[in-house]
């Protein structure tokens, strides 16, 4: 009686279970890039509301520092964006740690999968910490500007005040 050979059983990582239905590789997914370029009547590409320097709308305003208000707006926008990204990346690190902790340890060590997951997620958490530090430094930048240029700011601020209305002196007649 001839011994029949059965198809290989899928391993823990699925390396033996190759399907011809999905021929995309894991490291090179297919993607599409759509570019919408609007043009004015004369054929010149139109710019966005960010100004004529070609700055596209994004998380930050155009880096034009001709007034203290522009510097304040830029630093405040940078701080807000960095804080928001810090929260998102920190949450992503926690999710990554939870997902990777569910992968069984190949050597069967107790708590091995959690240790490996924490080691990987620690790098993403460092990114979240760096974004939090960037937010702090953006606020510190504007504070340092106020401290270093206090004399100039006060000189201009004094001139910018409205002149006081003349007060009627009733004693003088």
Image (cartoon, rainbow, N blue to C red):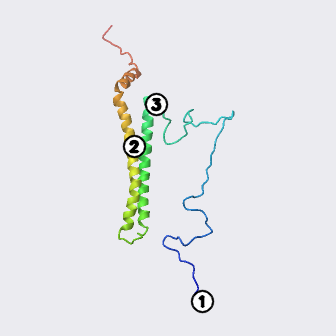
Label 3 crowd bin: few (<14), some (14–19), many (20+), radius 10 Å: few
165 is higher (above) or lower (below) than 53 = above
Question: Which residue corresponds to mark 3?
Answer: 65
* Disc 2 target residue: 134
Q: Which mark's residue is nearer the viewer, 1 or 3?
A: 1
Q: Position of residue 134 (x, y in %)?
A: 39, 43
Give me the C-alpha separation between circle 1 and circle 3.
Answer: 84 Å
- Residue depicted at 64% across the width and 40% down the height: 38
Residue at mark 2 to residue at mark 1: CA–CA distance: 71 Å
Q: Quadrant of residue 108?
A: bottom left
In the image, which disc is placed on residue 86?
none
Q: Which of the two labelled residues, at mark 2 and mark 3, occupies the earlier sequence position? A: 3
Q: Which residue is mark 1?
A: 2
| Label 2, residues with CA under 10 Å away: few <14, some 14-19, many ≥20 | some
Q: Residue furthest bottom?
A: 1
Q: Quadrant of the C terminus?
A: top left
**Corner quadrant of residue 36:** top right
């Amino acid at each position: 009686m001839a011994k029949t050979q059965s198809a290989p059983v899928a391993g823990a990582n699925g390396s033996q279970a190759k399907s011809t239905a999905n021929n995309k590789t894991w490291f090179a997914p297919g993607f599409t890039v759509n570019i919408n370029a609007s043009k004015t009547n004369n054929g010149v590409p139109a710019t966005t509301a960010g100004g004529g320097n070609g700055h596209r709308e994004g998380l930050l305003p155009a880096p034009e520092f001709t007034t203290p208000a522009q510097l304040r707006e830029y630093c405040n926008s940078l701080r807000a964006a960095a804080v928001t990204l810090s929260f998102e990346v920190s949450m992503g690190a926690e999710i990554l740690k939870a997902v990777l902790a569910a992968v069984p340890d190949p050597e069967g060590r107790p708590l091995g999968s959690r240790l490996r997951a924490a080691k990987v997620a620690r790098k993403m958490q460092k990114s979240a910490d760096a974004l939090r530090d960037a937010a702090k430094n953006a606020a510190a930048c504007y504070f340092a500007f106020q401290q270093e240029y206090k004399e100039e700011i006060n000189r201009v601020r004094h001139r910018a005040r409205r002149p006081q209305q003349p007060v009627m002196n009733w004693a003088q007649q």
